[in-house]
Amino acid sequence: MKERLRAPLAAAVAFLIGGALLASGPSGLLDPWRFLFPYLWLFLAFEAARRRRRLLDAEAFLIGAAVGLVSDGILAKTLQDGVFFLGVDFLGALASIFDWGMIAVVALHVADACRPRVEDEAPSSGVLELVALVFIPAAALAAYLFDVWVGRTRFQRMLGPAWLLADLLFAAAAWALVRRAVVQSESAEPEERDVRLWALAAFSAWLPGAQLFARAGGGWPSLLGAMYAAAWTAGFGAWMRRLWLERGHAAWEPRHAVRPILALAAWRLLGALLIYFVLGPVDSEPRGAAAFGFLVDLPSRLVFLTIFFSSRLAV
């Protein structure tokens, strides 16, 4: 029973730190469908797959990113907008891949800290889990087909005729991420972090900092803003170089209950609540999104990147 509570626990943690509070405050937590998909289904699928193959933090990152792309890119279409080429927010999609991977790993790590795994215990999936694994994606597919028929989301996002191509691109990217996770899980020993994962993480952590320092210099373009952004880039590059050079010294044994990761989860929750009560929901106060990005999201990415690429986290 303790093992079967892990997926709902991880889903609850991810739901709390994943952005629902940022969008509409505590009322955003009253959306049962958003909890069922992608959060609960993601962790039910991960636990079911983990009983059959070796899935560590890197694989959890890839699977979380894949499900996030399907949810945000295809179903909700928050990564699509008619003002972009092919209607795809490519920079937003890259950031979404990193954020969803981070949230999946952090949520699983918090669940492991609360309910440590018993490695010699491998319970089979219960009937409710199996029903949920089939019913939830079937309901998501039905909702997607209904939206395709009525065109509500395409109208709201001002999407042109290339919307189907964008959906296929997101589906292909999600499949590639899952396929990479499967390949990694079949190796005899855990692999080093993929160089493409390094590049994605570096870009996702560098970009919001560069935007912050550029704005601190009086907007863009400006000489002072360029100097601030260049200083940030130089410091960030030196820090990433150090992590890269020390990558071979990371211990293979997964670490349990890493305090900075637990603090990261708590800060994402408390930071979202604080910003909501001070500025209000993002729907009515766009400054909340900027405050969350700089005060919560940027520190979260920096902390996670540092620990994820210098050690292995228990999931």
Image: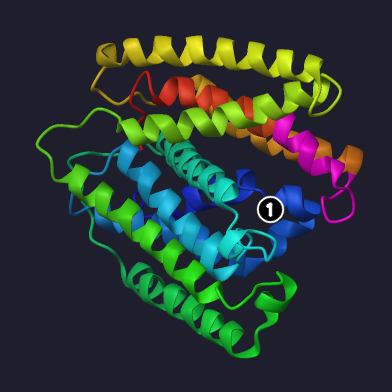
Q: Residue at x 64, y 75 (%)?
A: 160
Q: Residue 32 vs residue 260: left or right?
A: right
In the picture, which quadrant includes the C terminus? top left
Q: Residue 71 vs residue 59: left or right?
A: right
Q: Residue at x 74, y 47 (%)?
A: 22
Is residue 305 a member of the stretch shown in magenta?
no
**Residue 251 place in picture, x, y as percent:** 26, 17
Q: Is residue 99 above or below residue 161?
A: above
Q: Is residue 1 something that shows in the picture? A: yes
Q: Helix, strand or loop at disc 1?
A: helix
Is residue 294 a member of the stretch shown in magenta?
yes
**Residue 99 place in picture, x, y as percent:** 54, 42
Q: Which residues are magenta?
A: 280-295
Q: Which residue is mark 1?
A: 20
**Residue 156 place in picture, x, y as percent:** 74, 73
Decide: few, some or many residues near mark 1? Use Cα within 10 Å; few <14, some 14-19, many ≥20. Answer: many
